[in-house]
Image (cartoon, rainbow, N blue to C red):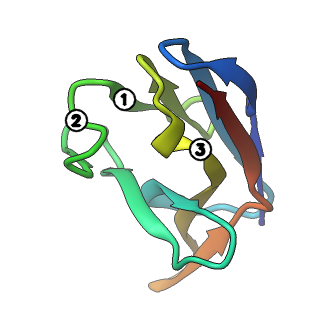
Amino acid sequence: VQVVESGGGLVQAGGSLRLSCAVSGSTFSINAMGWYRQNSGIQRVLVATITRGGSSTNYADSVKGRFTISRDNAKNTMYLQMNSLKPEDMGEYYCYADVTTSGTTTFRYWGQGTQVTVSS
């Protein structure tokens, strides 16, 4: 199973970015997915999560109303639309996917991260 993020970059404060997280490989079922952010030397912070069907989402208070998490199960891809970006949103964004590869065994797979830089 491979998890690959993309879409990071440099943006001015108030701007927007859309991150993508694509899952490939032997995936029987992709369950919950989500995004974390990590600043250098600081613990990863949960940004947003989404259930398998996409009907339930959860956001950190700091991003509510500005970020939207979504997924396209036909493409095994999750997205994070980030609007009204602030300097405090800056960091390395990691996505994860809880994948069932066979039977009832589920593992959490992580991407390599994508950097988001917000200039003030």
> 63 or 80: nearer the eye?
63
The answer to which quarter of the image holds residue 84 is top left
86 up-or-down from 57: above or below: above
> 39 or 109: nearer the eye?
39
Residue identified by numbered label 2: 64
Identity of the residue drawn at 74% across and 33% down:
8
Q: CA distance from mark 1 to mark 3?
A: 13 Å
55 up-or-down from 14: above or below: below
Circles 1 and 2: CB atoms closer than 8 Å? yes
> 74 or 32: nearer the eye?
32
Relative to 91, 2 lies left or right: right
Q: Is residue 75 visible?
A: no
Q: Residue 17 in the image: x percent, y percent? A: 60, 20
- Counting residues from the start of the chain, the first of labels 3 and 2 encountered is 2
Pointer 2: residues within 10 angstroms few (<14), some, or many (20+)? few
Residue identified by numbered label 3: 90
Q: Is residue 66 visible?
A: yes
